[in-house]
Image: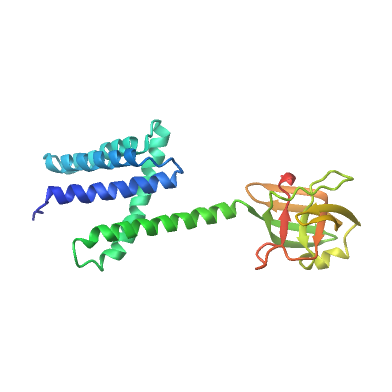
Amino acid sequence: MYYEIYIDVFFLINFMMDYLLLAAVCRMLSMEFKRRRVLLGALMGAVLTCLVIIIPTGGIVRLVLCHLIVNSAMVMTGLGVKSARELVKALLMLYGGGFLLGGIFSFFGQYIRTGSLFFLFAVVSYEVLEAVWAFFRQVHRQNGYTCEAQIETAGKRIRLQGLIDTGNRLKDPLSGQPVCIVEREAVLELLEKAKEQRQIGFRSVGNTNAKILLVRMESLTLWGKSKKQIRDVWIGISDTRISTDGTYRMLVNPDIF
């Protein structure tokens, strides 16, 4: 059994797919996209791949040449990678992006009936990959600003989801302690058992002279990148909802970490 390969078509396909992959890896690694450099890297990858196919070598040797030598040269040229650590990271991204791009393209490929549509579906697959990656980055970024919280007093505890709000710099003027803000409805059963209550003034956008109720709870525990527990903590009580959909019921002051 043998395959007949048209080297010009093989080169063109490899050149385009290498370009899309390098562009995707550049986006994944948040690197500066330089079109000429990426084009040069894709060109090198396509040329070297064709040479590996043309030169008669064993299967293992050809595998090593394609996946180690060719891809490394392509990444180093197309992305300007210099250190070994960056190279390994870029290669992992290259294979990960190739796996996703190949899966997306296979899905669209079943609808290809004309050879000229190959390039159109390749570009569409790349755009889908870009959208998927942007979605995952958004989720990751959002998760980086959330944490789980537990407020406890008088033997009762409530767990809720908190949003780490970099705009919340509220502090208790007496103790100097950063103040987190929670919805009143979320802690109703704890309010009547709170040790102390008092009001403090604060300023916010569109509200320069307002007051907020502070209640003293026995402990506040936060789980984010690390666990943080504060004893005898002052919590601000909001009469309005923290988020419209109820996902977050607490605004966490980042200074508390």
Query: In terms of image quadrants, where is residue 210?
Result: bottom right
104 relative position to 204: left or right: left
Would you say 124 lies left or right of 48 here? right
Q: Is residue 233 left or right of residue 222?
A: right
Quarter of the image with the N terminus in it: bottom left
Tell me what residue is drawn at x 79 percent, y 58 percent: 152
Q: Quadrant of the C terminus?
A: top right
**Residue farthest top in this picture:** 83
- Give how far across and how far down residue 223 sits, in percent: 67, 52
> Where residue 156 appears, x then y in whole percent?
81, 63
Residue 174 lies in quadrant:
top right
Image height of 219 relative to 193, above or below: above
Q: Residue at x 54, y 56 (%)?
A: 139
Residue 81 locus on image (x, y percent): 38, 34
Q: Does residue 64 appear in this view?
A: no
- Is any part of residue 105 visible from this angle? yes
Residue 51: x percent and y percent? 16, 39
Colour convention: rainbow
Q: Residue at x 66, y 54 (%)?
A: 147
Q: Dividing the picture into quarters, in which one does residue 239 lie?
A: bottom right
Q: How many marks?
A: 0
Task: Name the residue rendered at 38%, 49% in the picture.
Answer: 24
